[in-house]
């Protein structure tokens, strides 16, 4: 909708939180946010068991979260990022 409105001259900023998901056989991978560069990652859970959350940080700022088998964590992260993003 933002793209269409901007084509009509509105000059709106696209501020949606980026995300994607991918399904590889029975493993769902979700990614919320954007982290081109980071200086730390925290891993909660066991990637080998297909149940983990990986948080990407720059300093004390959380940039993105990748989850495997933790859809609720992914949704909570998306909501938290949306609440931080100015309209």
Image (cartoon, rainbow, N blue to C red):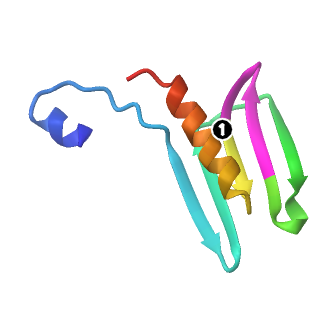
Q: How many marks?
A: 1
Query: Magenta stretch: dominant SS?
Result: strand
- Under tag 1, what secondary structure? strand
Residue of label 1 = 64
Residue numbers of the magenta segment: 53-63
The location of residue 45, given as percent across then percent down, is 89, 53
Front residue of this view, candidates 14 and 78: 78
Q: Residue at x 52, y 27 (%)?
A: 83
Q: Does 29 lie within the magenta span?
A: no
Assess disc 1: are there few (<14), some (14-19) or many (≥20) residues with their C-alpha within 10 Å of its C-alpha.
many
Q: Quadrant of residue 15?
A: top left
In the rendered view, does 13 fall on the left or right side of 67? left
Kindly give the residue lying farthest to the left in the view shown. Answer: 8
Q: Is residue 36 above or below residue 12?
A: below
Q: Residue at x 63, y 56 (%)?
A: 30
Q: Does 61 lie within the magenta span?
A: yes
């Amino acid at each position: 909708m933002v793209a269409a409105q901007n084509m009509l001259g509105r000059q709106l900023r696209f501020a949606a939180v980026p995300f994607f998901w991918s399904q590889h056989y029975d493993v769902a991978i979700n990614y919320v946010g954007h982290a081109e560069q980071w200086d730390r990652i925290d891993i909660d859970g066991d990637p080998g068991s297909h149940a983990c959350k990986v948080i990407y940080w720059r300093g004390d700022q959380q940039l993105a979260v990748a989850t495997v088998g933790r859809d609720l964590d992914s949704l909570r992260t998306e909501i938290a990022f949306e609440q931080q993003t100015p309209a």
